[in-house]
Image: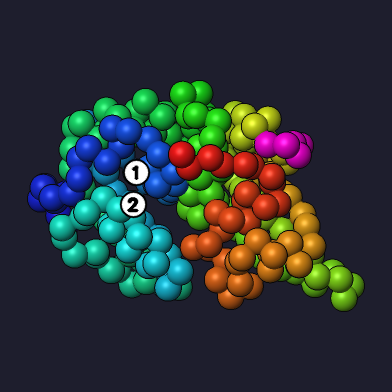
Amino acid sequence: MTQGVRTKFDESFFDVIGPSQAWVLGLLASDGCIRGDRHIHFSQSGPEGLKIVEEVARLLNYHAEISHNKTVCQVQHRLWFTSRHVVERLSDFNIVPQKSLVYRFPDNLSTNLVGSFAAGYTDGDGCVGVYNYGNVFTLMMSVVGTEQFVTQLTERTPCPKRPRKLRAENCWELRWYGKKQSLLESGCGVNHLYFQVESFVYFVIGLMVDDQ
């Protein structure tokens, strides 16, 4: 699909923000790209990434084929869509062109939607895993972003953590640790980490979400 093709999708999707919209906003905040005043694309890699892209396409009622591009390591799966209205709406949540080094947590996001947004952001630019440290299985979730974003994110959680600086410019990381059993009790299978990360975010970070 070329950038000049207008793809049919639900341009009103972000007009009212609920849990599904907040999840997609988190994905676009971490892994979305805005070009100019109307072009948006979102991509993920690998089989788990394809599941995420397919779910976003379903939610957006996206009427076009998902593009698949083979890279050195994995296949990249991408959605392209064009809408001035959506680009303007995304800007309300600080999702703008060239946001990577300046992104800030959206102040206008309702408290009850922080969990869904954080889950989407983690699906896009985070990591969840179970690691063996001296025969002790430890659950770890990490999120990377700008210093402003990760500071504002951790301030909104019941268990704030101190961000640590990474080597890349204005790139900081938050880490939360827990027991392996926490992941199992939260309903996430060890082999099904990324797409089901939302319940882990709720369980480990303690974000209580009201979908009403």
Q: Reply above or below: 48 against 88.
A: below
Q: In the rendered structure, does residue 186 fall within the stretch colored magenta? A: no
User: What is the number of the mark on residue 46?
Assistant: none
Q: Residue furthest front?
A: 212
Question: Is residue 186 among the parts visible in the rendering?
Answer: yes
Q: Is residue 210 left or right of residue 59?
A: right
For label 1, the crowd category at 10 Å Cα-Cα, with few meaning under 14, some 14 to 19 and many 20 or more, is many
Q: Residue 190 appears in which quarter of the rendering?
A: bottom right
For label 2, the crowd category at 10 Å Cα-Cα, with few meaning under 14, some 14 to 19 and many 20 or more, is many
Q: Nearer the viewer, residue 204 or 48?
A: 204
| Whole-percent x, y for residue 80 in the image | 23, 52
Residue identifier under label 2? 42
Which amino acid, mark 2?
Phe
Identify the residue shown where x is 14% and y is 51%: 7
| Whole-percent x, y for residue 86 in the image | 25, 35
Main secondary structure along the magenta-highlighted residues: loop
Identify the residue shown where x is 48% and y is 42%: 211
Element under label 1? strand
Residue identifier under label 1? 33
Question: Is residue 25 among the parts visible in the rendering?
Answer: no
Q: Is residue 62 left or right of residue 95?
A: left
Quick check: marks 2 and 1 in contact, CB under 8 Å?
Answer: yes
Where are the magenta residues, as a range? 157-162
| Whole-percent x, y for residue 31 in the image | 42, 49
Identify the residue shown where x is 80% and y is 70%: 137
